[in-house]
Image: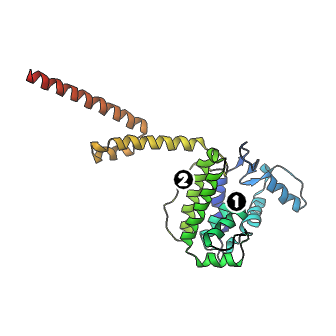
Amino acid sequence: MQTNFNTSLELVLKHEGGWSNHPADPGGATMRGVTQRVYNGYRSRRGLPQRSVRSIEQAELRDIYRSQYWNPIHCDDLPSGLDYALFDYAVNSGPSRATKDLQRVLGVTVDGHLGHATLTAALQSNTKDTINALLDRRMAFLRSLKTYKTFGAGWTRRVNEVRSSSLNLAGAPYPAPVAHEEPDSSAKADEGDLKVTQRDGFKEKIVGGLASGGAGTVAALQGIDWRVALAIVLAVTIGVTAYLIFNRSSKEEATS
């Protein structure tokens, strides 16, 4: 079958980013998604001296991803799209957990070993439905982790983007994920994302509050920075209040 390894690895590396050593990340020192522990094992098996994972070479990186993640879960034998969805899950949470969740979705024996029965079930399933169900389980697992409060924003964004890319690879068009200037680390809290989310949510509330003022007003504010939108809301509110007070005073004078 065709292989999506190069495409899938490129997508994974966009999320993994570069060097990270977050104190709350149990993986510890990590370079482009490869932990120091994994890199030590890789070089030890080849009789090479130990060194910092920050010095990992591109050829080593590709070999680790293919030999320790892609090949063990038989991605070359899986339907296009499902191969990438399972691969990214395996990189982020381990091949065994990723495989077990796939087996739960497919209704086969859950043993963490992707063998003939699992492959057959995967090939016979509806690929789009399998991808969605697998990623739903992945999100449920991530939400159950005690570090979700720290890394949840980045994890959620990653899974959403994996879903989009996986369905597109499967030939089931799905809205492309929003491009981000900075890649997501698999376990790196991004406070900037939280601030953007809060800002956009506030802006939506502002625009929604003007709905009674006409569709044209709402449409006009959709592309405006939230600070400008807030200033407009305040100006309109003050103007309307002043008009009502003036109008009321005029009526009272007329009837007196």
Which residue position holds label 2? 179
* Residue at image point 54% right, 62% down: 164
Residue 128 relative to residue 73: left or right = left
Check residue 164 in the rendering and tell me which mark sits there, or answer none.
none
* Label 2 or label 1, whichever comes before in sequence order: 1
> Residue 14: percent from the left, percent from the top?
63, 55
Residue 55 relative to residue 132: left or right = right
**Mark 2 or 1: the one toward you:** 1
* Residue at image point 84% right, 58% down: 41
Which residue position holds label 1? 91
The quarter of the rendered structure image containing the N terminus is bottom right
Identify which residue, 111 or 113, lies in the foreground: 111
Q: How crowded is mark 1: few (under 14 residues within 10 Å), some or many (20 or more)?
A: some
Residue reaching furthest to the left: 255
> Residue 238: percent from the left, percent from the top?
30, 29
Display coloring: rainbow
> Residue 53: percent from the left, percent from the top?
79, 51
Res. 9 visible in picture:
no
Res. 36 visible in picture:
yes
Identify which residue, 253 or 76, lies in the foreground: 253
* Residue at image point 63% right, 54% down: 142
Q: Residues within 10 Å of mark 2 (few under 14, many from 20)?
A: few
The quarter of the displayed image where residue 255 is located: top left
Q: Is 22 above or below relative to 13?
A: above
* Residue at image point 17% right, 28% down: 247
Q: What element carries label 2?
A: loop
Residue 245 relative to residue 201: left or right = left
